[in-house]
Image (tube, rainbow, N blue to C red):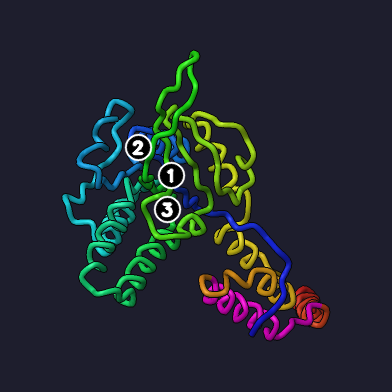
Amino acid sequence: MMQLRVSSKKQAKIKLALQGCAGSGKTMSALLLAYGLCNDWGRIAIIDSENGSADLYASLGKYNVLSLQDNFTPETYMEAIGICEDAGMEVIIIDSISQCWDNLLEYHANLQGNWQKVTPRINAFMQKILQSEKHIICTMRCKQDYVLNEKNGKMVPEKVGLKAVMRDGIDYEFTIVFDINMKHQAIASKDRTNLFMGKPDFTITPTIGQIILDWCNDGVNVEMIRQQINNAKSIEELTAIYHKYPEWYQQLTSDFMQKKMQLQEEKNKPSINYSTNFTRYGSNAATACQG
């Protein structure tokens, strides 16, 4: 049943994309962001589909690497995400997701124009990313071209990124999309946090990750609501909490039911008439004393 509710910001895990052409610094930027998000290299994993490029930055810290080894199907990426989640990683970097799209395009080329066997697979992959309870940073390669820019009185060719190598509209899936230029500077082309939109080009550092983490943590989470449920003193109060957070119904159904049963049991307990008992016990005590 559809129901209106008051808006509330939930605590979240960031789903972020970095796009740029080769040499723009996507991998290093992703690692610096990841460190800012968790402040622990040991809880960062990078799923590498870029021929070992993840190991080039090992001097930064002892992060974890999972190589896909030329198997770039959506199902392989999904399995890799699951491995990282099960290992207790806090931030997962997928470098890059463009190979997944290349794999699907190659598969599609043999289907004579039939997208019905392609779309569900890329959708499942994106849902795996979006539903993960970990921070996930994806890199995407951009098709590149050259433009002529004036430098010191001369026209010099400069490499620029164009469209990301990925399904059209993929940027709508992410909370933040940073475009990285060949000077290793970023600008937000998509930003639901409103932290970076309209800001001038900037260099990505761990501080940027910390800023994003603060935004992620600024809201309610399941444990905070569970505490409210446990502290409820009446069924009316519990019902108000239930209607306040409908988006948490599925996760907290058992908590609501258990608390409701507890409150009902407490309400149905027979009350004790302390004044009558005191009079009776007092009378007995007086009689005993007289005896």
Please identify the quadrant where the N terminus is shown: bottom right
**Mark 2 vs mark 1: in front:** 1
Give the residue type that dot 2 points to: Thr
Cα–Cα span, label 2 and label 3: 18 Å
Q: CA distance from mark 2 to mark 1?
A: 18 Å
Name the residue at 57% across, 54% down. Answer: 11
Q: Are marks 1 and 3 in contact (CB under 8 Å)?
A: no
Label disc, if present, on residue 27 of the rendered structure:
2
Asked if residue 262 lies in the magenta stretch, the reply is yes
Magenta-tinted stretch:
252-274
Name the residue: 81% across, 80% down. 283
Secondary structure under the numbered disc 2 in the rendered image:
helix
Q: Which residue matches tag 3?
A: 134
Residue 281 horizontal/vertical position (percent):
76, 78
Look at the numbered disc 1 and give the secondary structure of its residue.
strand
Is residue 291 something one can see in this rendering?
Answer: no
Tell which residue pokes out farthest to the left in this image.
Answer: 69
* Residue position for label 1: 162
Within-10-Å neighbours for mark 2: few <14, some 14–19, many 20+:
many
Q: Nearer the viewer, residue 204 or 112?
A: 112
State the image coordinates of residue 124 (x, y, percent, origin top left). Answer: 36, 68
Name the secondary structure under disc 3: loop
Left or right: where does residue 151 sit relative to residue 236? Answer: left
